Image (spheres, coloured by chain):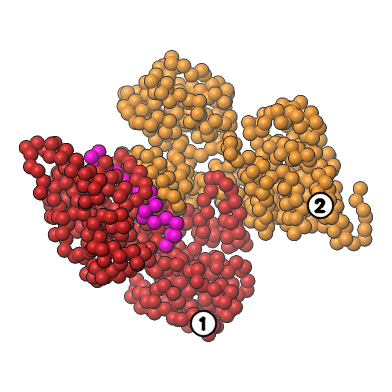
Chain colours: A orange, B red
Amino acid sequence: MWKKTNSKVVENMDHKKNMLEIVKSRHLRVGVVGLGYVGLPLAVEFAQNDVCVLAFDTAKERVAKINSGENYISDVNTERLTELVQTKKLSATSDFKELGSCNAIFICVPTPLDKFRKPDMSFIEEACIAIGKNIKKGTFISLESTTYPTTTEDFVLPIIEKESGLKEGIDFWLAYSPERVDPGNKAFSTKNTPKVLGALSSDGLIIGKSIYQLAVDEVHTVSSPRIAEMVKILENTYRLVNISLINELALLAGKMDINIWEVIEAAATKPFGFQAFYPGPGVGGHCIPLDPFYLEHIAKKFNFDLSMIHTAGHIDLLMAHRMTVKITSALNRHKKAINGSKILFLGVAYKSDINDERESPALKIMEEVLKKGGNVKYHDPFISKIETQQGHVLNSVDLDKERLKLADCVVITTNHSVFDADFIEEHAQLIVDLRNMIKEASDKVYKL
Amino acid sequence: MWKKTNSKVVENMDHKKNMLEIVKSRHLRVGVVGLGYVGLPLAVEFAQNDVCVLAFDTAKERVAKINSGENYISDVNTERLTELVQTKKLSATSDFKELGSCNAIFICVPTPLDKFRKPDMSFIEEACIAIGKNIKKGTFISLESTTYPTTTEDFVLPIIEKESGLKEGIDFWLAYSPERVDPGNKAFSTKNTPKVLGALSSDGLIIGKSIYQLAVDEVHTVSSPRIAEMVKILENTYRLVNISLINELALLAGKMDINIWEVIEAAATKPFGFQAFYPGPGVGGHCIPLDPFYLEHIAKKFNFDLSMIHTAGHIDLLMAHRMTVKITSALNRHKKAINGSKILFLGVAYKSDINDERESPALKIMEEVLKKGGNVKYHDPFISKIETQQGHVLNSVDLDKERLKLADCVVITTNHSVFDADFIEEHAQLIVDLRNMIKEASDKVYKL
């Protein structure tokens, strides 16, 4: 397919020129590896902009769903997805050999922390091996998975070069562009959130920018992949640190008879130099509880101690226990212990109005309450079944007057907007509100 | 002057009604205690709005300056001040007996930390004693000095009640409203920065709001003084924590060959959930290095450990030393030691374009360099003379080619906008830039 020449530089020039022409005409095929909350919206955005997309996932159910036009990510518009599949702009496969047919490949696989809170790089590694084994010359590759700075250069590059026998900057281009997806955010989606991009070579940067511009409004280029990797870590470290700060201040405020929510509301009137964060039972989801610890991991290699991240992580680690103490204190007012009491949790999602309970603090509190002998039930309109880390499986119960009355304590763990605070307050015996859903504390309402 | 009745409640009602009428007609006399960067702008703002202001300060030079229409605070417009003095809207005195002629008194005195980093309450105490000894019935009193939550209730109230023999809520009203002055801020001044106000009584809140509204655009009321006290601490704790976070990340980034300034610029393209902070040699001024430690002080009373503030404070405490290490490393490139080298510091103000060197990190670095035998000079267009904590007195030198060439190392400690980065880079032998004034690092330019 590619013109052979004696000079690598000339060949490279041809690849670049050829690629820019393909991009201009939109006659390229984009491969997206990993069809979760990052990959699927990106695939849809490219397809929506008249680019042919082939989406890859090892999970056969996901592939089957996509190919039948069925949506499973709440940020994706179902009608749009169905139409793109019907018009053949978007299709999915588990056959990674098909990567060889793609001009540009986006890696959107997870990077979880393992049980010892070290980065689990196996998903990125597998994706890179598959890409290395199958790519053709002249392919642009971008890693979107959040990871520690230096990953693209020191981890991804050697694997792809080894598996493909090709040379970056000559035969293919490698870049890093962090996903900034905020599930449930109605104002900012993949399309209108500026994309940061750092490539290993200047050609890669030009090509990558031209490709991303097919799908997103604004591309902000930086001078290296490690800068782009650090950007994402900074964004989420900022959030972890500020959430932990306000959680710690909330705990002190409770002791000082100060309503921290009223304090934050007033501080937010400052028109400069302040951004409001709100307390809660701890951070959850796939980003904030994880990303800062990728940096902590690589910092060790540089003999560097990240004391702010460590302290913030320490506060967060103790939040579930501290919230259990609040439940104990509330029940104590009614001369009850957790052991044998009926505790009803409202909301298990890690934040409001989404159907994702990964790393959710609600699960950790439920587990501790279960361990102490509590009779635990939960209601979440978005999540019908959960399994805690210790393997307890629970199904969401209906929420009605009787259910609220029966509970010795109702714990508000997620502030889904469908919850009716007045209804809950009217019928519950005792409430521990960790989300400021009920504005006034009282004998019945115990607030964080 | 006040109508006597048998009933305290009726008397109180009369005071309140009377006060609201006085405020409405602007026939009140406002007393401002403390004529620094908070008190003077507030005094000017009231006077500017047709309210007669009597300003109090123990420093006779300040009083004399005001009375001759001379300005000494850069945020205050000199012409405006002169005119207000000439038209007798504003005058100053050191005679605290005159407090008895004021309807409303604003306490704007400093609350420094003492040498053991404990709050020094002596200025507030002296002001309260003077107020207690002199006020008349029906006076509104507001504390604006930043301090730990509970100060108004537990420290100010007992002093004023004891000294005056009057009762709060009946004979006078006490409130807390934090100053939010940001020296050098061109967009937000006393007038257009919303004012948070918490009073001990509901009458005090109504009266206080009506008075503040004579001078400021927006008053945000909260339910107690301690909420208002906590607001200010939260605002500045947020800043200390985020500056320390970015300083720590900058130090790691340096080791990882990552330009932290480029990272921040890229992260700032995120349109939600992020606020950019920039690294530097440490925090300075009268607020950020102090306010969080007022909270740490009172937290001890509640057996509470503020780990985030502690960690942020620890990072900041080490910054001057770490910056000295950077100077040492830079000089080492030229096979020089600090001992015997000529080190020229550019900027000693704690932030750009202001004439205030209180708690400035530049002074701390200069002191450490002096201790190590460095030959220290400085240039600051706004500050002609400084004294370090150890008592070294230095005068600002002129900045020219020769001065730059002569220095073994030029350290950029404050990014005053008048500094010409190109000129400095052209003529200096070696530069340690702690403020991102010179965009590209090089053999000659060592960046934080």
Q: Tell me the subunit letter for badge 1.
A: B
Q: Give the structural element (helix, strand or loop) at label 2.
A: helix
Report the side of B254 relative to A436 (left or right): right
Would residue B238 be seen by someone viewing this image from the given angle? yes
Q: Is residue A247 magenta?
A: no
B362 lies above or below A159: below
Residue B180's spot in the image, x, y percent? 37, 54
Residue at mark 1 to residue at mark 2: CA–CA distance:
50 Å
Q: Is residue A51 left or right of residue B385?
A: right
Task: Residue at 57% x, 77% y: name it.
Answer: B423
Q: Magenta stretch containing residue B202, yes or no? A: yes
Segment colored magenta: B184-205
Question: What x and y, as percent, mark residue A306?
Answer: 52, 54
Q: Chain of mark 2?
A: A
Residue position for label 1: B400
Q: Nearer the viewer, residue A137 or A91?
A: A91
The amino acid type, in three-letter code, at marker 2 is Leu
Question: Few, some or many C-alpha atoms within 10 Å of disc 1 (few <14, some 14-19, many ≥20)?
Answer: few
Q: Is residue A143 above or below residue B259?
A: above
Q: Which residue is at a point 51% across and 23% down the rendered structure image? A: A379
Residue underneath mark 2: A20
Residue drawn 67% across the image and 49% down it = A218
Residue A15 is situated, as x and y percent measured from the top left of the image, at 85, 54
In the structure shown, which secondary structural element does the residue marked by tag 1 occupy? loop
Residue sitting at x 66%, y 33%: A76
User: In the rendered view, does B416 fall on the left or right side of B220?
Assistant: right
* Quadrant housing the C terminus of chain A: top left
Residue B291 is situated, as x and y percent measured from the top left of the image, at 35, 55
Residue type at tag 1: Asp
